[in-house]
Amino acid sequence: MTAIKKVLVANRGEIALRIFRSLKEAGIATVAVFSEADRLSPHVRFADEAICIGPPTASASYLKSQIIINAALRTGAQAIHPGYGFLSENADFARQVTNAGLIFIGPSPESIEIMGSKLEAKRAAANFGVPLVPGTSEPISNPDHAERIATEIGFPVLIKASAGGGGKGMRLVEHASDFQMQLERAKSEAMSAFGDDSVFIEKFVKGPRHIEFQVLGDQHGNIVHLFERECSIQRRHQKVIEEAPSSILSESLRNEMGAAAVNAARSCGYFNAGTVEFILDENNHYYFLEMNTRLQVEHPVTEMVTGVDLVKLQIEIAEGKKLPFRQEDLTLKGHAIEARIYAEDPENQFLPDIGKLSIYRTPQGPGIRVDDGFQEGMEVPYHYDPLLAKLITYASDRQQAIERMIRALDEYQVVGVKTTIPFCRFAVDHQAFRSGNFDTAFIQKYFKPGEPSVNLSETELKLVAAIGASLRSSLMANPVTETTSEPEVNPWRTNRLNG
């Protein structure tokens, strides 16, 4: 076993801060990396040391693997934690890290490669008896043959990129007459996003729920699951609201799906933290979707209902320690909900809305956790994902967690950019969400841009208008000025790394 004493986090924003906090509690020194756009970001100030790795664009900074590895070597870091996004699921990066004599706080490069290809992942999972959605097991090469297969499966079908996720390179085809056009579009999107135009076909599951299981494995062959997260409320195939546990799973189905998740992890020799994603149909039949070989954005809800610090365990697993518990030691307690606060305009197809946070105040109180990477007065950079924060509420039961989330969303104040706060407020207070009777088509079914998210009386509407007018007048009279001076000197070092 190797005691890790210093870690570089190859990421930015809220996830970098989240990881730093667990590292600090463990007495481990921290190194931040940042692009020129993030020079004044909180994650830079929070770390013991910080190194600039390049210009604002991710391709010139956070995706520069050798520069990041050089930063770790230069600062004496023993390990690199990739967070999520950027290089977190890049097998070549994980291999370069270990080849440089450093510890990669994540799974093996081989596991990342297997689960990074949806087709390889399906084959591996199938070998361990994990249920799969009916479809092709090999990339499509002949368009006419592909159309015959789709016809045999039965429309509607999904065409999906083999090499990626996030909805890129994925097309729903409802009629045979549209198949060839959608196939070409899917292949083009896949090549543009992932450099690989391989696609495959799956049966489209009607009324699906997106259920995922958190898994943890050590380097001694022990693997457990930490129960499920419900992630069905999505826009552009990406999650907006998550909760744990799911309101729909029975105890027996939870145990069955959890065992399948563990088997999926075993199928690729997995260790460290990962997530096995399933879709659940209207008849409670579940099918393996994919495995994310990293820490998930929504990991806090699992931490809240299990009392487990997933980042702390990631570090211990990377050190070679065994898991401190067995499956039977883990229990669910209470209910947690996460709302992702994006700088996006729900009224305009959730398109990013970038600007300065002239007012940014987070909710507080019992059962509230905010993981963010912004402060009042900061600019939201257009170079990266527009996630401002993750708002998590926890309570003894689902109903109380919902009420707490509504209160927290009402308390959240953001001025300067449009956010998903109004949509999240609408969603968690909607009858479909409250009843638990919803699926991944929630937005298409229920969210109508332009309609108020809550029912206000005429008096309340006048009050809101008056407050808005007063706020605008106040901002015009006392505009937030941008400082051009460097931040006050603090006890960390900021270095410039060239190469």
Image (cartoon, rainbow, N blue to C red):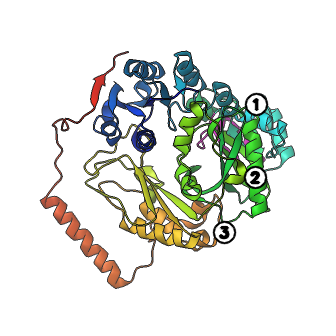
Where does the image place residue 153, in percent across and percent down from the top left? 84, 46
Please name the residue shown 34% across and 78% down the image.
461
**Residue 188 falls in image quadrant:** top right
Label 2, on which residue?
A: 257
Label number found at residue 437: 3
The residue lying toward the viewer, choosing from 59 and 320, is: 320
Which segment is the magenta one? 164-186
Identify residue type, mark 3.
Asn
Label 1, on which residue?
A: 139
Decide if residue 1 is on the left or right side of residue 26.
right
Identify residue type, mark 2.
Met
Give neighbour class at mark 1: few <14, some 14-19, many 20+ (Cα, 10 Å).
some
Q: Disc 3 to disc 1, how far (Cα)? A: 35 Å
Q: Is residue 374 visible?
A: yes
Where does the image place residue 143, in percent across and percent down from the top left? 77, 32
**Quadrant in which the N terminus appears:** top right
The residue lying toward the viewer, choosing from 449 and 375, is: 375
Question: Is residue 165 shown in magenta?
Answer: yes
Give whichever of discs 3 and 1 has the lower sequence position.
Answer: 1
Identify residue type, mark 1.
Pro
Please name the residue shown 16% across and 55% down the image.
479
Question: Is residue 422 shown in magenta?
Answer: no
**Quadrant in which the C terminus appears:** top left
> What kind of element bears circle 2?
helix
